[in-house]
Amino acid sequence: MLWTDTKLGSIAVEGKTLGTDEWTNTPSSILSAISRRLHLQKDHPLSITRQLIESCFPGFKCHNSLSPVVSVQQNFDSLGFPPDHPGRRPSDTYYINRNTVLRTHTSAHQADTFRANQSDGYLITADVYRRDAVDRSHYPVFHQMEGARTWDRTRVNSVRLAQVINDDIARMPTHDISVLDPNPTIDPEHNPRQMQHSVEETELMTMHLKRSLENLIVKIFDKARKAAMASGDTDPYFQEPLKVRWVQAYFPFTSPSWELEVFWGGDWLEMLGCGIVKQELLNNAGVPERIGWAFGLGLERIAMLLFSIPDIRLFWSQDPRFLSQFRAAHSKGHPEDTTITRFSPFSKHPACYKDVAFWIPKTSSSAGGNVGANTQDFHENDVMELVRDIAGAKVEEVRLVDTFVHPTSGRKSLCYRINYRSLERTLTNQESNELHEKIRAALVERLGVQIR
Ligand code: FA5
Ligand code: MG
């Protein structure tokens, strides 16, 4: 398999040495991303976006340097993920060892941050890691920003807490965009209120949460529109009013829960997940007197909207033609005063599509169960990772284009289309052929498939 080199022994991450075991599935290409800290790099679009978002939440305490190496307890257990939740699978998550993962979301720090109880509101910006598909808006390493706002029941007469939240809402700015929000706040079957919260409290916290996030998106979009105008761009997208919608969602650590989507690039793009924090989480974190909301947003998704950056891989570019295009506000200036300049593509290189079709190996064990990463059955994310491992940023997209089950033998065959395209230069025919050959060979060698 891919990670036999780290199977026995240890991995050094951030100056710490961690033992590996049969769960270890983190390749060195992923480990090497840890030191990049794009969200803290001056003038990087992710850093500019982070500061702009931070300016939308005055008074919130900001955490920007929490280690990505967390325990399974922090990433999953503390948030109430059931033992068989798919997110825990080694096909989806990078394990350092049985008890240690690279955080898959910034929510891994919720319990600890609530426990520290340093402020009513906090923001956490960090790199997160997921074995995921490769395309224009998905990447295995990306950045999230977590935000939470809680109210202390003991600081006010509990009868009046609703009034306090109401007053907080009255002080918030309003906006005039149209928001699609067809579902009731509380839907007993699909999106229930928690027993510990009254209907009024749930409604008010939700209003505060949704208004905070809508205001954030409005601010980002206004900046993006100004940047587009300033560059003389006539993209009709920016002439039309911003369209956003709320969608019911499910997270083990919030209820009710939602996702916010923004219409962008001809489609609805999911920006964030959020909801009312499960009271059990706050109780377990030693702050049973607090109630409140939390959200987690994809920083790249927001930055793509803000700067009109069309491809998520660009954020990892070290090319000065990319990096020199962005400038944060003067150190004495307020982040809100930053003038956003729209990204201008520095080159367009041709795409090169190549297909690979193969029979997948027969299932060797029943799927699921408590097996380590190295004994799992065939999984699509293994293909994604293998391609990334071999071709890195020279692949723009890997897409399943055909599935076939043999009528008599029952064997299953898959065909993937790989788009070879570099953002920085034109790949030669020979180069993409060689990459494709290497990928074919590795599919056989590492995943045991049979090429058709
Ligand atoms: C979460 O990660 C939850 N922790 C969010 C949350 C926090 C809910 C607090 C409730 C309370 P989700 O898996 O949907 O949820 O990811 C959140 C956002 O990260 C997505 O909306 C999307 O904007 C971004 N995102 C997810 N996967 C990727 C990816 N592979 N590449 C880039 N961005 C991604
Ligand atoms: Mg989601």
Image: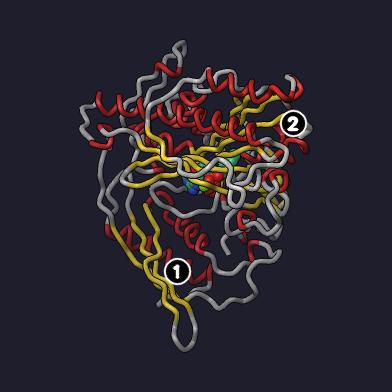
Q: Position of residue 173 (x, y in %)?
A: 46, 20
Is residue 143 something one can see in this rendering? Answer: yes
The residue at 36%/63% (across/down) is: 417
The residue at 56%/39% (across/down) is: 274
Image quadrant assignment for residue 232 = top left
Mark 2 within 8 Å of ligand 1, using the beta carbon? no
Q: Quadrant of the C terminus?
A: bottom left
Relative placement, left or right, of 427 versus 451 is left
Q: Which residue is mark 2?
A: 115
Is residue 106 something one can see in this rendering? Answer: no
Vertically, is 174 above or below 357?
Answer: above
Q: Position of residue 248 (x, y in %)?
A: 52, 46
- The tag on residue 81 is none
Q: How far, Cα to Cα, is label 2 from label 1?
A: 50 Å
Q: Which residue is mark 1?
A: 441
Residue furthest to the bottom in view is: 408
Vertically, is 246 above or below 290?
Answer: below
Image quadrant assignment for residue 16 = top right
Mark 2 touching mark 1, by CB under 8 A?
Answer: no
Image quadrant assignment for residue 428 = bottom left
* Residue neighbourhood size for the residue with mark 1, other residues' Cα within 10 Å, grouped as few (<14), some (14–19), many (≥20): some
The residue at 46%/31% (across/down) is: 214
Vertically, is 397 above or below 52?
Answer: below
Q: Position of residue 4 (x, y in %)?
A: 62, 61
Three-letter amino acid code of the residue under disc 1: Ala
Per the image, label 1 sits on a secondary structure element best described as helix
